[in-house]
Image (tube, grey):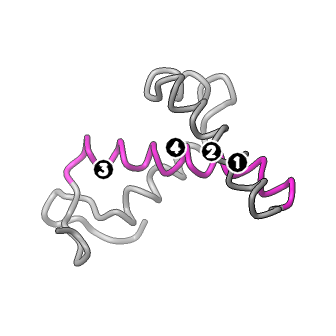
């Protein structure tokens, strides 16, 4: 990452890069296990349903429609990490 963490707390950007690096190293079965252990099935179903409804209303192309639930899942996992790890407050935090 190149930046040194002096306070022991991570910024959101550092957490995001760590998550990307972890995902990059995981095999599909490991990624599936990570999701199964951390994301309730009803949440996954919600992402799929919401993405489908959102995309159909705005006539969004099929490639984006297929990727939207994964993007929502990534955001969800990022938020889980923020809640579990010490995160350095950022200006928009209230």
Marks 2 and 4, Cα distance to the nearest angstrom? 27 Å
Q: Which residue is tagged 2? A: 50
Task: Pinpoint residue 43: horizontal percent, then vertical percent.
Answer: 51, 32
Q: Earlier in the sequence, mark 4 or mark 3?
A: 4
Which residue reaches farthest bottom?
91
Crowd class of label 1 (few under 14; some 14 to 19; many from 20; radius 10 Å): few
Crowd class of label 3 (few under 14; some 14 to 19; many from 20; radius 10 Å): some
Q: Contact, CB < 8 Å: mark 4 with mark 3? A: no
Per the image, label 1 sits on a secondary structure element best described as: helix
Per the image, label 2 sits on a secondary structure element best described as: helix
Which residue is painted at 62% across and 45% down in the image? Answer: 50
Q: Which residue is tagged 1? A: 53
Task: Pinpoint residue 24: horizontal percent, then vertical percent.
Answer: 62, 46
Per the image, label 4 sits on a secondary structure element best described as: helix
Crowd class of label 2 (few under 14; some 14 to 19; many from 20; radius 10 Å): some
Q: Which residues are magenta?
A: 61-86
Q: Earlier in the sequence, mark 4 or mark 1?
A: 4
Q: Does the segment drawn in magenta span residue 94?
A: no
Which residue is painted at 26% across and 75% down in the image? Answer: 92
Q: Which residue is tagged 4? A: 22
* Vertical position of residue 25 compared to residue 11: above or below: above
Q: Is residue 19 left or right of residue 13?
A: right
Marks 1 and 3, Cα distance to the nearest angstrom? 28 Å
Task: Pinpoint residue 74: horizontal percent, then vertical percent.
Answer: 54, 47
Q: Earlier in the sequence, mark 1 or mark 3?
A: 1
Toward the viewer: 47 or 86? 47
């Amino acid at each position: 990452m190149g930046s040194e963490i002096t306070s022991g707390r991570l910024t959101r950007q550092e957490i995001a890069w760590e998550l990307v690096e972890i995902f990059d190293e995981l095999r599909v079965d490991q990624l599936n296990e990570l999701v199964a252990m951390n994301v309730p099935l009803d949440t996954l179903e919600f992402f799929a349903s919401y993405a489908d409804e959102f995309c159909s209303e705005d006539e969004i192309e099929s490639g984006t429609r297929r990727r939207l639930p994964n993007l929502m899942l990534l955001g969800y996992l990022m938020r889980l990490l923020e809640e579990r790890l010490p995160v350095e407050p950022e200006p928009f935090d209230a």
